[in-house]
Amino acid sequence: MRSGKGVKIMRRLKLMTMLLAVLLSPLAAEAQTRQVVRVAVSTATPHNTPFWVAKDKKIFDKYGLDVQMIFVAGGALVAQMLAAGEIQVAAGAPAALVSLVASGEKIVAFLGVSNTSPFTLVSQPSIKSAADLKGKRLGTARFGGSSHISALIALDHLGLNVKRDGIVLLQTGLDPERMAALEAKGLDAAMLQRLPTKMMLSRGYTALLDLNAAKIPYQNTVLAAKREFVAPGAKIGENFTRAVIEGYAYVFNKENKQAVKEVIARNLRLQKPEQAEEFYQEALEEMDRKPYPTLEGTRTVLKYVAEQNPKVANVKAEDFVDPSLLKRLEAEGFFDKVYGGKS
């Protein structure tokens, strides 16, 4: 037989279990009712900071969303996943997406994550001018991606042509691989983003063209979805966008600087938040408080992608860019609300 003391303990445990079940049941029910939104990101970049913040600070939860962010190497694969319905939102370069639009997919860019190219054309110390680049090897990431299109834009801006001037474009991986290839003399030049550029310039390498400083219209990264996701009355798309805009407002609020740097550090796997300072500044300088995708920047993308895929020549920027949801939010005063009247 159980002792009186043992019976009392069992009763207490049972009571605690029942109480815990009562307390947790609303949380479990809430988790079950949240709508799942799968978002694929093709590049780990500071431009993703508003999404990371919205996830970390549970802003998505506030809007009844269970946002699952996955990293997928390569914009082409992200685009294919979106077309197949495996994800609801793609965060990536428009180049691969517009090729799908040319094939009849109803995909639109509803938010401009990065409306300028973050790349600089960096060359060996011995290469001092555009003319010195003729007949040389230029490294990008995957063909069709942002660094590749940025390379074509940079060469055009400098009066160079790949075929005419014998310039060899090579797929040489992400920034660290391209930096290593430069140092090993495997490349004569490479497209590099902000921090890698700064590091290479400190070692004596040459910046032939900073595309961001040159203010060349270019739609670098977008949030894209199937058209019905952002159509009037589509609450899931609207709630997702509201949460993202709140993420933007959180990032731009300088009182949140330390918290934002901590989020960046975790997502970029940095050892300390202090190491995120440069990435934090990059996010502030290269993101827009009202992140509308741009028609002019998209036309630049279409021009260069059409050279690789002639079908894209039939796509108009207006077919791909759909700012209607952002316009509806702005008209109701949502931007002013989340920015405290300072949008």
Image (tube, rainbow, N blue to C red):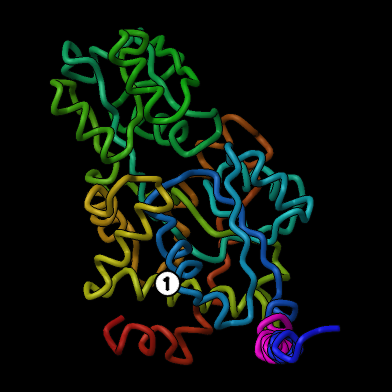
- What's the residue at 68%, 58% (across, down)? 107
122 displayed left or right of 316: left
Residue on which the image places disc 1: 247
What range of the chain is rendered magenta?
A: 16-30
- What's the residue at 31%, 67% (across, down)? 259
Amino acid on which disc 1 is placed: Gly
Is any part of residue 118 visible from this angle?
yes
Measuring from the top left, give residue 251's x and y in whole percent.
33, 69
Measuring from the top left, give residue 187's x and y in whole percent.
35, 13
Is disc 1 placed on a helix, strand or loop? helix
188 displayed left or right of 32: left
186 displayed left or right of 224: left
Is any part of residue 324 visible from this angle?
no
Q: Main secondary structure of the magenta part?
A: helix
Q: Quadrant of residue 188?
A: top left
- What's the residue at 44%, 26% (across, down)? 140
Q: Please state, as top left, top right, bottom left or bottom right, where the N terminus lies in the image.
A: bottom right
